[in-house]
Amino acid sequence: MPPAATELVEDRRGAVFLEFLIAFLPLWVFFLCVVQLALIARASLMVKNAADSAARSAAVVLPDDPNEYAGEPEMSLARQPFAEDDVFAAMHRLASSDSDESALASLSAKPLANVGRSRLNTIRLAAYVPLAPLAPHGLGFGPRPSIRDAIGDERVLLTALHHQPFALAVTFPGSVGDVASGPEITVRVTYAYQCTVPVARRLLCRSFDELESRGDYERALLPILSRFSGARFYELKREATLLIQDAPYGYRTRGS
C-alpha cells in the first residue's frame, strides 16, 4: 500500500542521505591530504638522513688522495658525468646480489669510490642510497594514482637507479665556485618527492616547472615526466654541516 501524502512530507531519509554526501566528500579529501602529508613527513626524515650521509662523505672525500679521483685536485667540487665503466660496475654489483635489500647493503657497504671519476659524484652517491626506498612505483606513469602505490608495495630497485639521479640535487651553500674552502663543509640535499595520493597530490604538490629549485636537478627527465604523465612533486630541502677531516687514508692496490 503506497504511503500517504503526510507520511511522504515527514520522510527525512533523502535529506539525511544528502547531508551525508555533503559531509563525506570534505572528510574524504581531508583524509587523503593527511595520508599525503604523512608520506611527505616520512620522506623529509629520509632526505635529512641523505643530507647527513652526503656531509659525512664530503668531509672525507674532499681532502682525499687525488689519485683516487683520476687526478682531480683536493677540495674540488667540479661536476663530471658518469662513465660507462661506472654504470657497468654498479650493475654488476647489483646483479650479484640475491635481493633488493642485499643490493642496497652492497652499495652502502662498498661504495663506488671512483664513480664518475669526481669527488662530487661520490658525494652524490652517498645521498642517493638512503633515498632509494622513495623511488615511485612505475615512475608515476599510471593513469590512476592510488593510496596503495603511494604507501608503496614492493619497490623495484631498477626504478630507484634510473629515477633518483634526476630527482635529487646535491649543492654546497657557502662554497664559491668549484672549490670548497674553510674548515667545514655544508651540504644541501634537495629532493623532488613524487606525490601519488589521489586528489591530495593536486592540492599539496606542484608540477616540476613550479618547483623552486628546478634548475638544480641534473637532467630533463622530471619535466618530461611532469608534462606527459601529470606527475606532481613536493620539494624537500635539508642541510648538514661537518668539519672536513683532513686525515691521510691508506688504500690497498686496486683488485687486491
Image (spheres, helix red, strand yellow):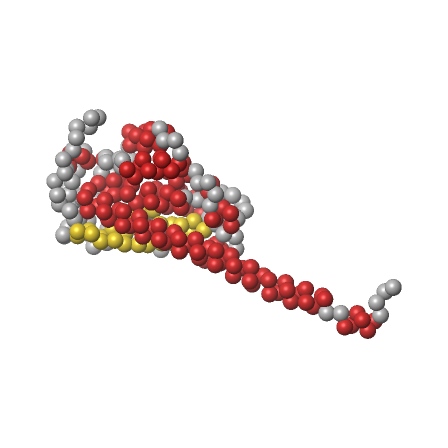
Residue 132: % across, % down = 37, 43
**Closest to the observer, 108 or 137:** 108
Q: Is residue 18 above or below residue 64?
A: below
- Number of labels in the image equals 0
Q: In what quadrant of the picture does the C terminus appear?
A: top left
**Which residue is drawn at the image coordinates 43% and 53% (left, top)?**
39
**Which residue is drawn at the image coordinates 72% and 66% (left, top)?**
13
**Closest to the observer, 48 or 178:** 48
**Which residue is drawn at the image coordinates 35% and 28% (left, top)?**
96
**Horizontal arrangement in the rendering, residue 4 relative to residue 228 (left or right):** right
Q: Is residue 155 above or below residue 238?
A: above
Q: In what quadrant of the picture does the N terminus appear?
A: bottom right
**Closest to the observer, 36 or 216:** 36
**Closest to the observer, 100 or 215:** 100
Q: Is residue 34 above or below residue 49?
A: below
Residue 29: % across, % down = 54, 59
**Which residue is drawn at the image coordinates 54% and 46% (left, top)?**
144
Residue 181: % across, % down = 15, 50
Residue furthest toward the top?
255
Observer able to see residue 208: no
Observer able to see residue 57: yes
Residue furthest toward the right?
1
